[in-house]
Image (cartoon, rainbow, N blue to C red):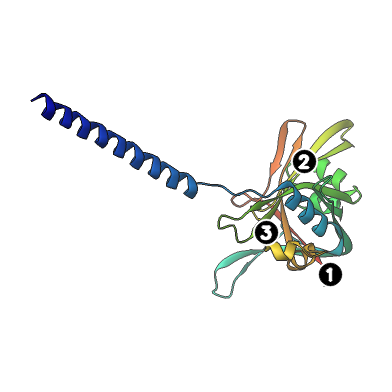
Amino acid sequence: MKIQKLENEKLKFLGVILLLFTLLSLASCSNEDDVVKQLTGKQKETYAQNISGEYPGRYVIIYKSKDCVEGTDEAGRPITVAHSETFNGVRVDVSDNNMLHVFFQDFPISLISKVVDADEGLSHALAEYSQQAITARYGFDYDTDYSHVIWAFIPNVMPLNLNYDGTEHHIRIVFNNNSQYYKFTQDELKQPKAFCSLAENGITLQLEAIYDGSTLIQRFGYENGNYMHIMFKANQ
């Protein structure tokens, strides 16, 4: 009986060992599947160097304001006919790895006055404002399948100090990236001026909101409100 009992205990012990080996094996496989690849610092530095430079081109700006007329599309459905303006002789500057910034140079701030109708004084002040750069931070990451590299940017808030209605106003203009990101192959990013093909197809922003200090003046692009869609296209 004692021998039988010992044999049973040995079998139980072996069973536990086999179970532990099985669990460890499964855990190891799971970890391999869950490995997240990341770009190295050297890769990011090289890619940033290769997209850096000055890219001359134009802004194509489509905007809706209260004076837009109503029309119909090809199917006879009612639509609002938006305004469209093109500004030539502008450029986008892309910095290297030391700054990781995009500068949408020579942006016509005065055009924003066309869509601001919540504050007449602000609208008039903006109409007199000179061109300004929209700045944005950028970065790289792998796409989910690791076959492409994603390039994306986040615009910075643009601060303006304006005097109107007898008061100084600390205006903050908020843009967004239109929820867009852009894909490169790694071979493309190994070429100088790799940004050309992307910029030729167009990089887009949207006007999101304007604040006076912490007070929201107007939000754009929501429901039936005014909006401004901005596309930069590099010269081919």
Task: Answer few, some or many: residues within 10 Å of disc 1's Cα (few below 14, many 20 plus, some between 14 and 19).
Answer: some
Q: Are marks 2 and 1 in contact (CB under 8 Å)?
A: no
Which quadrant of the rendered structure holds the N terminus?
top left
Residue holding disc 3 = 182
Task: Kindly report the distance in space between the C-alpha atoms of the residues bearing marks 2 and 3.
Answer: 22 Å
Amino acid type at mark 2:
Val
Residue in the foreground of this view, choosing between 19 and 39: 19
Dot 2 or dot 1: first in sequence order is 2
> As displayed, is residue 9 above or below residue 184?
above
Q: Dot 2, how many residues are within 10 Å of its Cα: few (below 14), some (14-19), or many (20+)?
A: some
Find residue 122 and report its horizontal and vertical position in percent.
82, 41
Query: Mark 2 or mark 3, which is nearer to you?
Result: 3
Identify residue type, mark 3.
Answer: Tyr
Could you give the CA–CA distance between mark 2 and mark 1, rounded to whole angstroms?
27 Å
Residue underneath mark 2: 157
**Where does the image place residue 151, in percent across and percent down from the top left?**
70, 55
Rendered image quadrant of residue 147: bottom right
Q: Which mark is residue 170?
A: none
Image quadrant occupied by the C terminus: bottom right
Residue at the far top in the pictured view: 2
> What whole-number distance in Å separates the C-alpha atoms at marks 1 and 3?
18 Å
Which one is closest to the eye, mark 1 or mark 3? 3
Residue hosting label 1: 235
